[in-house]
Amino acid sequence: MQAFDFVAPTSVDEAVSALAAGGGRARPLSGGTDLIAQLQEGRLALDTVVDVKRIPELMAISISDDGLTLGASVACQSINANQAIRDAYPALIDSTHLIGGTQIQGRASIGGNLCNSSPAADSIPNLIAHSVTCHIAGPNGRRSVAAEDFCTGPGRNVLANGEFLVAIEFPAPPANFGAAYLRFIPRNEMDIAVVGAGASVVLSDDKSTIQSARVALGAVAPTPLFVQEAGDSLAGQPVSEETLAKAADLAREAAKPISDMRGTIPQRKHLSAVLTQRALRIAIDRARGTKTVDELGRLNGHG
Amino acid sequence: MAGTKQNGTGTLAANGQNGYKVIGTRPVRPDGVDKVTGRAVYAADVQMTGLLHGFVLRSPHAHAHIRSIDTSKAEALPGVRAVVTAADLPEAEDKVEDLGEGAINLKYLSDNVLASEKVLYHGHAVAAVAATSPHIAEEAAGLIEVDYELLPPVMTVDDALADDAPILLETLRTDSMGEVGAEQTNLASVFSHQRGDLDAGFAGAHLVVDRTYRTETVHQGYIEPHAATALYSADGQIIIWTSTQGSFAVRGQVCEILKIPVSRLKVVPTEIGGGFGGKINVYVEPVAVILSQKAGYEPVKIVMSRADVLAATGPTSGSNIRVKIGVDADGKISAALAELYYEAGAYPGSPVGAAANVSLAPYAIDNLQVDGYDIVVNRPRSAAYRAPGGTNVAFAVESVVDELAEKLDMDPAEFRILNGAKENDRRPDGLQYARIGQIETVEAIRDSEHYQSPLEGKYRGRGIASGYWNNWGGQSSATAVLNPDGTVNLNEASTDIGGTRASIAMQLAEAMDIEYEQVKARVVDTDTVSYNDVTGGSRTTFATGLAAYNLGRQLLKEMKSRLADQWEVAAGDVSYEEGTFSAGSESVSFAEAAGLVQREEPLMASSTVHPQDFGPGFSTQCVDIEVDPDTGKITILRYTIAQDVGKAIHPSYVEGQMQGGVAQGIGWAINEEYIYDDEGRLLNASLLDYRMPTSLDLPMIETIMVEVPHPAHPYGVRGVGEVNIVPPAGAVANAVFQATGVRMDKLPISPANLLEAMWAKEAEAAELVPGDD
Ligand SMILES: Cc1cc2nc3c(=O)[nH]c(=O)nc-3n(C[C@H](O)[C@H](O)[C@H](O)COP(=O)(O)OP(=O)(O)OC[C@H]3O[C@@H](n4cnc5c(N)ncnc54)[C@H](O)[C@@H]3O)c2cc1C
């Protein structure tokens, strides 16, 4: 690993200055579970690493009737240990439990997962399904973008020079809301998604009809993929395997994967449908109050 | 006091000899406390004043000529103390020498350590730097300019044997059982074992199954990366501290490569975090030595990264295998043919010879032919891996055997019992068996609660498979010092990978009728005892244990003789029972005797052994799996291994070997493989994408130790370390057939490969491939 400067500002403004001064050769550091590994392996070379974890806003969790605001650097473990989040956003825990193992979760953040902008990142399809808003600070002040608009390519996103992610905001879950994230990996741990699928639904009061739904896929395109047509196809439809299968077909069609060592095109297209349907089933079960996080943990391969 | 806690899951299927006091108990290992407290010194932990750090520059190409190497910029970087290339190694002769670990061409040995004219695989070492910090060394390596002339990569058996295949090694000629060919070739050697009348056997067969298989390159996956520290002193004496399966093997190879007499090199083995055959060849050791010399006689440490370990060390061969077996109407095998094409990697020496012996070893067959081909390809030089070559060929043979049993509507265990090899039957190469336990292992599985229990549910299946491993004797040296307080220091040179300090000390304790805790076993360096072969071939508890047994007998004999002198009786009149020496009215405890007999002269013993009569091992295994039909992912539901262990000295460590071999075999079966791009670059040189199983991927592995004592060892010991990895891939493949109806013809049976095979089967029925649009 090559030598670099390290700064740890305590305010958003200081961080913006440090990042802007460094140009492309300065990067924020949250948990470092991507950044340090990339520096070590020589996949990234930097002059300055800007640790943003001393900025209070980046480490804050605020949950109320209006929704949840997560500081960008909050570690997965802090989310897993927060009962209010587990109760209101059980599907978020699907991702925070999956990313790495116990040690990694003590450092890894959702903000880092989003800003690393891997097409296979395990939180991003989930954030899209949850209609999350990303709050950004930069030399020109603050701005916000929807999660589905954040990533622009493998390892690339909308952040401009000097900008960084401050927080992500989850809207309050509407009544009869349920969501889920599932990924497929060949092993049961320590793997990168061959395909990931995030889904959310809002059911009618009698829970027999889907009022609205959102579906997003990971690892099947240059960025995590919002499959709006799959969710739209479910709006107004009765909860049934046929309607879910139709949405799953649309997900398969939307998927534009490549073949690489982690998966082939036919396998990934097929899994897009399989996981979409399974994630939707769990989301519906959760909206109906019939499935717990722990059961899902088992489904996702945590013994 | 010897602990007797039964902490494994193992059951003993048959009891060998009884009446032991120490053997068969489960005492604490001598290295246990240091390992659980983190105090144990592994190779990367070696520290000393003035230590420099080495870094090896590796080829980014699979196949290229090296036109030139310019190291000037690296040498100019502040902090750099030495830069070396193959030019700093003595000229190696193009001749074959046996260094105790099988014959090897010295030029290949040297070229693998630092490439001279050509690089032959992605990751091949081309130069190295020593600097005051590891970061400077790495940065300097990046400044070395290597001018490569690229050549087309030759990655597989088929590539290598194609008519117009690019040639890897210019001087290589095919050796066909002693006859050397005239043409340049990538086919290093060919052999054939034949007996009986193959054609007649097949002609008379009631049923013949003939299939071909492909298995991929896999790595041993030891968790501790290779690391070595070398100190070249100004007086010419050299010390290497390294993690190795054989300190004498390191000494032999380094001395050959550097052309120095063995008396100038001392190799100190550190604790070792796994080897499985992959820590026999030297990689960084000779490089650290020449860096140390060139840097002005300062110590140099080189620690490999995980990526380097995967790219440049270890792996075992990928292979193409054909197996054809015929049976008569009763299910007796009438003829069998196996053709084994093994990829040796960059230099000749795949384990195809051993694979041929494994291939049909569990079966009694009159008419057979086994052909082997050793082929060079642009992958790392293959190294031994636990029962080298066995898993590949057993996957193929056991799949065919399972298909035969299925088509005959026979229980697969009964098929194996009907055809099972026993005493006086012959291995494929003709070697005749003494007393062996193959059929007993099948019976142990057949009669197990696991095999007898029903397996219900869709997409679930049960498979069984058998396997053989030859084991080894090898040479061992050890000394024992009797302390005046009645304890014994045992000095041996077999690297302790799986608890052998304990299992060897237990044999000395048993031989002397003392407590295990009275023996202090340690692994010493190459200057301290005489020559000692590697910890490999499942030989250590067997052969070094035999040396320990001899030491115990010698010490006792000498103690009796000295007591007899002191008591003024004939030596034969001194008896030793229940830890007490006595003659007439005289009687002393062992501890008192230890002091008494050394009042005039100290007492120690030494023993060297080279046992030729080592007993082979057999294993039969049973697995239940479930397949997710939508994803192709296999879940291992239950696993039972039965193995002929001779006599389990320390049952927990025997169970550990059995479980470890199965765990590695399952990884090989379902996920592990080297993945290359079209240019021959290794894509998955990390434990993220080289998918060994984690603890969450395996159930508890149930063990049945079948004890068929080996007649040629005082305690009946057989090697137990390797045969366990031979059957798993076949067992899993057979379970996959039961679960899905698909017979896999390749490894790994990864989700992607299994899904594709299930689609192909559906397409055969419906002519429709889902997802392919
Ligand atoms: C062993 C291991 C297992 C893993 N398993 C998984 C897995 O299962 N699933 C998965 O998705 N990932 C996995 N990862 C990757 C990684 O842990 C996650 O992506 C994690 O969420 C990254 O968060 P972090 O806080 O560590 O990010 P960092 O490494 O600190 O940062 C990641 C990137 O985001 C940038 N960044 C960080 N914070 C900000 C900010 N506030 N504003 C702008 N840019 C920022 C950094 O500059 C960097 O480019 C694994 C990593 C390891 C080492």
Image (spheres, grey):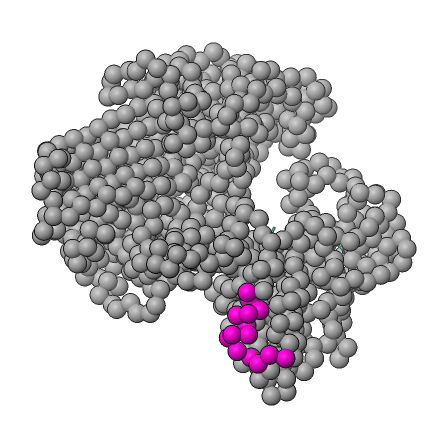
Most foreground residue, B319 or B126: B319
Image quarter in which the N terminus of chain B is found: bottom left
User: In this rendering, is residue A237 above or below A135?
Assistant: below
Task: Specify the quadrant of the image occupied by residue B471.
Answer: top left
The residue at the far front in this view is B767
In the image, residue B469 above or below residue A99 = above
Question: What residue sits 9% from the left and 52% below the top?
Answer: B330
Residue found at x 29% / y 19%? B175
Residue A237: within the magenta? Answer: yes
Q: Give the tally of numbered discs.
A: 0
| Place of residue A39 in the rendered image (x, y in percent of width and height, measured from the top left) | 68, 42
Which image quarter: residue B168? top left
> Does residue B88 appear left or right of residue B259 in this picture?
right
| Residue A15 in view in this figure | no
Residue B313 visible in this rendered orientation of the protein? yes
Rendering coords of residue B527 (x, y %) = 40, 24
Q: Which residues are magenta?
A: A236-249
Compared across the picture, whether B225 is left or right of B322 comes to: right
Depth check, front residue: A48 or B302: A48
Judged by its main secondary structure, the magenta piece is helix
Residue at image location 13% in from the left, 40% down from the top: B202
In this view, which residue lies farthest toward the right?
A140
Q: Nearer the viewer, residue B326 or B86?
A: B326
- Position of B694 with respect to B713 (left or right) is right
Q: Please state the horizontal and vertical placement of residue A50, each as a whole percent of the image.
A: 79, 49
B508 inside magenta stretch: no
Q: Quadrant of residue A247?
A: bottom right
